[in-house]
Image: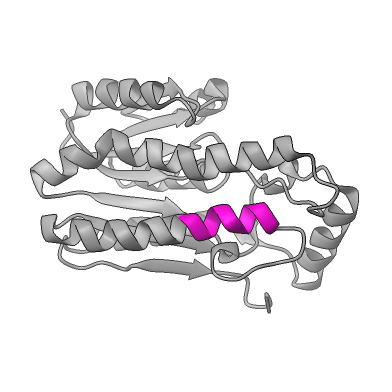
């Protein structure tokens, strides 16, 4: 058993998930890393890490991964529901299959992730849920129609969970980044949307590093359990919308 409690992260193979895994590993926390690209997680070579091949659409797979992590390191104290996809496109041209993927991963996947640890946190009267949203969960953007819908869902669910879980001393934090240097553009197949996104990103001087989001998650997690930073909104200084 480790001296510090277990930190669980979905979508841990890249981007903000990877950066958060590195930040918590550097701070001495044991990790449960979940994603579909196992080789990417293994290549991080982080100490005290349980690595599992998990698609967040598979509720049983998340539960099995949590059981494996807890068997080795004790209860999950922070669950970062980070896995998500951004298929941005003109809604009239976008294949409905891309809607399905965003809805299944960004909404159902988040709920599956929460479900795996929720009752344990309630019983222990301790824990932190970190919910990955986006600035697109606070306002709408062209060509983000369904993506915005999924992130507004995360905000609504998080608000409800926060109110319900406060009586059990369980914290719920929402992460709402703007343009961060991640692989998010890999999910954009619509050429016009991709060009507009890249132009906007260039105009603001590029995105900021995922490590800044990770460091904020770590810093706010390490505050006393009775102190909660409810939402982190982090954007490049030059991002105007």
The foreground one among 77 and 30 is: 77
The foreground one among 34 and 47 is: 34
Q: Is residue 73 magenta?
A: no
Residue name at image x 84 percent, y 55 percent:
193
**In the rendered image, which quarter contains the N terminus?**
top left
Residue name at image x 79 percent, y 39 percent:
95
The foreground one among 222 and 230 is: 230
Q: Residue 218: which quarter of the image? A: bottom left
Residue name at image x 82 percent, y 59 percent:
198
Residue 219 is at least partly visible in this image: no
Please state the horizontal and vertical placement of residue 63, each as a whole percent of the image: 32, 25
**In the rendered image, which quarter contains the C terminus?**
bottom right
Report the span colored magenta. 145-153
Q: Residue 168: which quarter of the image? A: bottom left
Colour scheme of this structure image? one colour
The foreground one among 8 and 114 is: 114
Residue 164 is left or right of residue 45, and the answer is left
Q: Main secondary structure of the magenta part?
A: helix
Vertical arrangement, residue 63 with respect to residue 100, above or below: above
Vertical arrangement, residue 121 with respect to residue 155, above or below: above
Please state the horizontal and vertical placement of residue 58, each as a whole percent of the image: 45, 25
Give the tally of numbered discs.
Answer: 0
Vertical arrangement, residue 193 with respect to residue 139, above or below: above
Please state the horizontal and vertical placement of residue 230, each as a whole percent of the image: 33, 67
Residue 147 is left or right of residue 93, and the answer is left
Residue name at image x 41 percent, y 31 percent:
33
Please state the horizontal and vertical placement of residue 240, each as a whole percent of the image: 68, 79
Q: Residue 64: which quarter of the image? A: top left
Residue 125 is at least partly visible in this image: yes
């Amino acid at each position: 058993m480790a001296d510090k409690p277990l930190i669980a992260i979905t979508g841990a193979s890249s981007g903000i998930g990877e950066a958060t895994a590195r930040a918590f590993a550097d701070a001495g926390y044991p990790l449960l890393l979940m994603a579909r690209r196992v080789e990417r997680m293994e290549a991080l070579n982080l100490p005290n890490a349980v690595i599992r091949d998990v698609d967040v659409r598979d509720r049983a797979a998340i539960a099995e991964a949590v059981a494996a992590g807890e068997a080795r390191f004790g209860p999950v104290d922070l669950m970062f529901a980070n896995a998500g996809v951004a298929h941005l496109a003109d809604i009239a041209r976008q294949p409905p299959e891309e809607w399905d993927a965003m809805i299944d991963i960004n909404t159902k996947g988040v709920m599956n992730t929460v479900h795996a640890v929720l009752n344990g946190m309630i019983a222990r009267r301790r824990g932190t849920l970190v919910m990955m949203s986006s600035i697109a969960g606070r306002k709408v953007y062209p060509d983000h129609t369904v993506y915005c819908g999924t992130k507004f869902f995360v905000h609504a669910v998080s608000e409800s969970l926060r109110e319900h879980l406060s009586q059990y001393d369980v914290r719920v934090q929402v992460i709402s980044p703007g343009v961060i240097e991640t692989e998010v553009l890999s999910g954009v197949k619509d050429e016009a949307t991709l060009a507009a996104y890249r132009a906007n990103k260039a105009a603001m001087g590029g995105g900021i590093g995922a490590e800044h989001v990770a460091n904020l998650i770590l810093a706010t997690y390490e505050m006393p359990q009775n102190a909660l930073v409810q939402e982190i909104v982090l954007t490049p200084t030059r991002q105007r919308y």
